[in-house]
Amino acid sequence: MEARISVRRGFLFPPYVFLLFPAVAFMLLMYAYPFLASVARSLIDNQGNLSFANYAKTWDLYLKDVIFTFGVTIFSTLVTALLSILLAVYLRFGNSPISRILAGLYKLPIFIPFVVVAQMMRSFLAPHGLLNVALAKLGLISIDYPLQLLNFSGLSFGFIWKMVPFTVLIVHGGFQMIDNSYIEAARSAGATLFKVITRILIPMSKSSILVALVLVYSQIVGTFTLPYMLIGGKIPTTITVDIAHRVNYFRDFGVANTLGVFSYLLVLVTALYYLRSTVKKIAETAPAEA
Amino acid sequence: MFRKPVFIITAEIVLLVLLFLVILGPMMSLLIWSIAERWYWPASLPQEVGFEYWKQALGLQKSLAIGAVSIVPAFFLSIFIAIVVVIISMLIAIPAGYALAKYRIPFGAFILFLFLMPNAFPQQPIFVNLLHIFTRWGLAGTVGGVVLVHILVGLVFGVWITNATFKSIPPHLEEAARSVGASSTKAFFKITFPLAAPGLLASAVFVFITSLDEFTGTFFVGLPFVNTLPMTLYSASGYNMQFASVIAIILLIPSILFMTLIQKMLKAEYVGGMG
């Protein structure tokens, strides 16, 4: 409608150009430019020549950490998937007072920023922290030999603690959309609870489960705060911690950016899936008017 | 729908107690540390509790003995940055969210990609390169630089939430106003804007909290000169558990409060990048 009015006045940009310009310009300058720069700088060595020197150095120094990052991410994502599906099933069918209390409580970690989660986990999982003290009180471990958790296991615990609630929120939302009549029909045909979960609930909310897990996976790869405060410079550590060390101690942007490219590669498949499915979903609800 | 035998109910209770402990355990640890004035291993609980660290943090007393400094300046700096970030982000995000909701735009897919990329790829390399760029522009270590980084983090949420809000408003309302002679600007401000207000407010709250909690971008671009609350928490956590716990609780309160208020708005695209 407006476009036509503009044409009558001579050549004018359609109104959306002005509406979108500030946001798009900001994103191009502050996101797209540094993104491309991170890839470009990874290919320039410290003499300013185009080379794979940074990649060779990163491969030698940090391959272990790339594998560690991938390991923590895959492990945490899979455990998150399992726990959140079980919890979402419980919330879907549970109608006891206990399940209603849990439904209110489980969301808390979603809103807690990573820097606070990191501080919590640091004090909770420390060798003399609350968890070890409680386990010792119960007689499960000896306080002289506390569990050492400021490593792979503690980091995974922190990620799972933060991510399960978010995933339950999305998966439970998907389960709620499934009509009870499907489940009742399957039940009356003799399906067990396990069959109902694997044949009805999961397949019917496949896309929302996948998007949630893809976001969890991408976010864990890119999270800096939790590993930095929980395990810091110990070996092995995560890519994000290495990037900070490379920048803060050596001002070595070449290797830092190469590590960044490695982290892009770790999320490449999930990122493309997320972008494709989200753009498709938005296109379905796009305005019809030309 | 599924009948429960007694052992399943027992299992349910055991599972719940475990879940409660796992969810609340780390929070309890924070709470205990924030009031522990003397806690020497191997005591399971602090030998002495009190609010000394709270008083010190909130600027109610100045004691050199416990070594902590007041967080009041950091608190006000964080609030100031968050307010500036909300104002600028919303001024940019509202028109963009509206345009993406109402018009079919050439290169639309490219623009959508640009606003989705930060959710899909790690953001830390972006901050590293912004540090490099900002050093050249004289913005590294300044409040202005930190504001720009926070806008970057907040803008994506701002655009998506305002976009969803405008999409939920039926277009025929604005068209009706236009057909009785209102200009498009007038139709927007008289019809669409008031209807969208709750969603826009939720979006602003989201951007505010994102800025208040932002760590990684501030760490690279702002340190060592811009000390927001999360930065103060980080530097305290190395040497003073009590002080770090107090700041952590102070950061936790607004996040839980505001996010509980805007629960209905929670969707995968927005919550995905939280923290």
Image (spheres, rainbow, N blue to C red):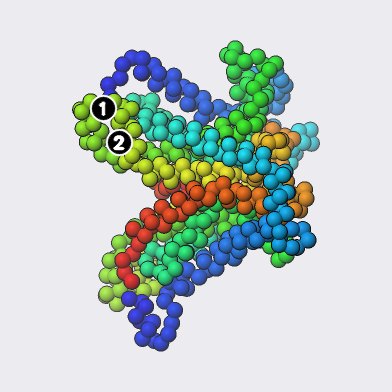
- The amino acid pointed to by label 1 is Ala
On screen, residue B254 above or below B242: below
Residue B54 shows in this picture: no
**Which residue is identified by label 1?**
A191
Residue at 41 percent across and 59 percent down: it is B163
Residue at 41 percent across and 76 percent down: it is A14
- The amino acid pointed to by label 2 is Ile
Q: Where is residue B66 in the image (x, y as percent from the top left)?
A: 76, 33
Q: Where is residue A244 in the image (x, y as percent from the top left)?
A: 70, 47
Furthest toward the top, the residue is A139
Discs 2 and 1 lie in a common subunit: yes
Q: In the displayed structure, does residue A111 sit left or right of residue B133?
A: left
Dot 2 and dot 1 residues touching (CB under 8 Å): yes
Q: Position of residue B255 (x, y in %)?
A: 53, 43
Q: Which of B206 and B13 is in front in this view?
A: B13
- What element does badge 1 sit on? loop
Residue at 36 percent across and 31 percent down: it is A89
Q: In the displayed structure, does residue A60 sit left or right of residue B206?
A: right
Q: Nearer the viewer, residue A251 or B98?
A: A251
On screen, residue B238 above or below B187: above
**Which residue is identified by label 2?**
A200
